[in-house]
Image (cartoon, grey):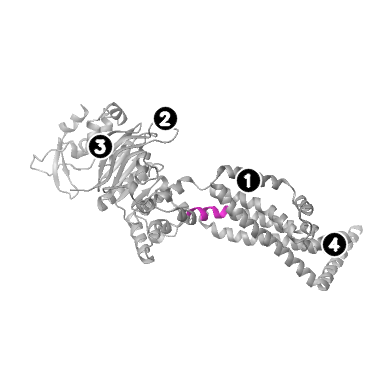
């Protein structure tokens, strides 16, 4: 059984002089190892919800539990060191080199020098930056994408179980963003971090999240898997927000495994093969270029696990 | 022919002035060196006191907006008063001598340091502060590792400005009995001796430039991260 990493119990946040609650009566459980995206427009309370987890915002009422412990009962500074924190543009300290930035938390945890050095090298490799080239550079000598990679490496330095990411890829160009998203997914699959990732980008939220929290006016509108949100939006707001009735949107968001059937055909040669995590858009392209009636589906280990018929795919449109 | 005559006349003047300078320096080397020393000492003392007042006060002001407005307003109005006026105003308050001169020079030196310190600390992006906090730094660590190094370049700009201002103003401090290179300049003015004016003036300029160069080098070293 997986542990509950973060639990919200009837949590409200009210800022002084505001008319309504920024976050209103939120109760939900986030399991260890889950990648959760928090989706909403600006002012929806998504960032506030996240910042309450590392106590950058105090809770007005209700409780948040971190692996079963009420976060208000923990010493705040030590508690924050257990949580990785990534902000937009990486939030790197401009007067520190890449290595110094990554070493911030290990340094305050008083690791010895060799351990810190080894960790910095390891993390640079993990985020795909050559240590000889980047270790001694200053943040302003890096591109936005590189800065963000360092930001992620820094947040992971002390190997926290939970990571909070506040629109980390918001100001990055589309191609670099795609790469960073793929890298983050790869890292998360390898290390099984629990991630809370705030974004206003629907495609990003659905691509990255195992489950998505849709926020609006401080309330959780729906908390479910991307597929279920797309196919069964909880209310009109969610349906409209994620354009659930837009066929193209569905194709972009839904993954092959949601419409996959068990294998029924015997011959597997000459048939096109898609991956379980490909989007239906990719699948559609495969159908169009291979002109077959059926596409096979493989998993991460290249094993054929199912098939999708053209008929099944076209049913999405209706 | 006439032009050449002027040339000749000018050259003669320069040579005679050089001779007078050498003659003065060889006869009064001790006095000269003492004047330089006094000048340097009073400038460094004033600057040091100004740093001790300006930086802590600036840090306090950057955390306290109401107080900041009051203090910067007060020091800015002091700044409008010309340095000579401040020096002269010291006489009825404290009489003449080194102490009133030191007080006056310190008053002149504080505003640039204070204002730049406030700007340095207030200019740190709030997001950096929040990131540091979110990563688990306590207040002391945030101050020492983030705020101080980020504000340092601007603080040094303030110290640089003050250093130049103080070392130049220390010349007129001789008026109220502070001694230093100002004594040589004022003696030169009184006796209409150009060589004394030159010796005093060039030495003061050299001290100002020297201060500027030294502090500039320090500043370069701490702002390495801002350049490629």
The Cα–Cα distance between marks 4 and 2, rounded to whole angstroms, is: 74 Å
Residue lying at 33% horizontally and 60% vertically, measured from the top left = A122
Residue B164 position, x and y percent, is 69, 56
Q: Tag 4 or tag 1, which sits nearer the N-term?
A: 1
> Which class describes the residues within 10 Å of circle 1: few (<14), some (14-19), or many (20+)?
some
Residue A236 position, x and y percent, is 28, 26
Residue A239 position, x and y percent, is 28, 28
Q: Tag 2 or tag 3, which sits nearer the N-term?
A: 2
> Which class describes the residues within 10 Å of circle 2: few (<14), some (14-19), or many (20+)?
few
Which mark identifies residue A19? 2
Q: Secondary structure at mark 4?
A: helix
The Cα–Cα distance between marks 3 and 2, rounded to whole angstroms, is: 32 Å
Q: Do callouts 3 and 1 point to residues on the same chain?
A: no
Which mark identifies residue B72? 1
| Quadrant of the rendering where the C terminus of chain A is positioned | top left
- What secondary structure predominates along the stretch shown in magenta? helix
- Specify the subunit that label 3 lies on: A
Depth check: give the residue in front, B131 or A129.
B131
Which residue is labeled 3 in the image?
Answer: A226
* Mark toward the viewer: 4 or 2: 2
- Specify the subunit that label 1 lies on: B
- Specify the subunit that label 4 lies on: B
């Amino acid at each position: 059984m997986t542990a509950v990493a973060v639990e919200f119990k009837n949590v409200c946040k009210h800022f002084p002089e505001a008319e309504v609650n920024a976050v209103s009566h939120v109760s939900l459980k986030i399991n260890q190892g889950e990648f959760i995206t928090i989706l909403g427009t600006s002012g929806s309370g998504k960032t506030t919800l996240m910042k309450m987890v590392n106590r950058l915002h105090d809770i007005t009422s209700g409780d948040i539990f971190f692996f079963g412990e009420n976060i208000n009962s923990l010493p705040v500074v030590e508690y924050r060191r257990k949580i990785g924190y990534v902000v937009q543009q990486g939030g790197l300290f401009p007067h520190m080199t890449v290595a110094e930035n990554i070493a911030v938390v290990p340094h305050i945890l008083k690791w010895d020098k060799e351990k810190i050095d080894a960790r910095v090298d390891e993390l640079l490799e993990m985020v795909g930056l050559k240590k000889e080239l980047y270790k001694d550079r200053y943040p302003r000598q890096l591109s936005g994408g590189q800065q963000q990679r360092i930001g992620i490496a820094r947040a992971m330095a002390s190997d926290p179980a939970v990571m909070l990411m506040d629109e980390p890829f918001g100001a990055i160009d589309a191609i670099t963003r795609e790469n960073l998203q793929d890298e983050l997914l790869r890292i998360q699959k390898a290390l099984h971090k629990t991630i809370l990732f705030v974004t206003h980008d629907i495609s990003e939220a659905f691509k990255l999240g195992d489950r998505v929290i849709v926020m609006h006016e401080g309330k959780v509108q729906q908390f479910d898997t991307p597929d279920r949100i797309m196919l069964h939006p909880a209310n009109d707001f969610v349906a409209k927000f994620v354009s659930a009735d837009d066929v193209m949107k569905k194709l972009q968001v839904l993954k092959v495994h949601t419409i996959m059937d068990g294998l029924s055909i015997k011959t597997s040669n000459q048939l096109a093969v898609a991956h379980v995590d490909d989007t239906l858009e990719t699948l559609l392209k495969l159908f169009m270029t291979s002109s077959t009636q059926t596409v096979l589906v493989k998993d991460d280990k290249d094993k054929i696990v199912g098939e999708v018929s053209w008929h099944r795919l076209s049913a999405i449109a209706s | 022919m006439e032009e050449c005559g002027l040339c000749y006349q000018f050259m003669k003047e320069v040579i005679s002035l050089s001779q007078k300078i050498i003659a003065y320096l060889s006869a009064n080397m001790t006095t000269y060196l003492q004047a330089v020393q006094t000048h340097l000492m009073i400038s460094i003392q004033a600057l040091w006191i100004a740093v001790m007042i300006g930086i802590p006060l600036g840090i306090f002001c950057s955390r306290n907006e109401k107080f900041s407005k009051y203090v910067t307003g007060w020091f800015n109005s002091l700044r409008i008063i010309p340095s000579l006026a401040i020096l002269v105003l010291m006489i009825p308050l404290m009489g003449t001598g080194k102490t009133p001169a030191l007080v006056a020079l310190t008053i002149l030196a504080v505003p640039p340091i204070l204002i730049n310190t406030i700007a340095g600390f207030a200019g740190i992006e709030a997001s950096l502060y929040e990131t540091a906090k979110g990563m688990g730094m306590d207040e002391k660590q945030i101050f020492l590792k983030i705020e101080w190094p980020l504000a340092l370049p601007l603080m040094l700009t303030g110290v640089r400005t003050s250093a130049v201002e103080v070392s130049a103003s220390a010349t007129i401090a001789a008026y109220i009995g502070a001694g230093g290179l100002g004594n040589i300049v004022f003696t030169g003015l009184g006796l209409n001796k150009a060589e004394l004016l030159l010796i005093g003036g060039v030495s003061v300029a050299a001290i100002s430039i020297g201060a500027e160069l030294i502090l500039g080098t320090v500043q370069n070293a701490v702002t390495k991260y801002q350049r490629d």
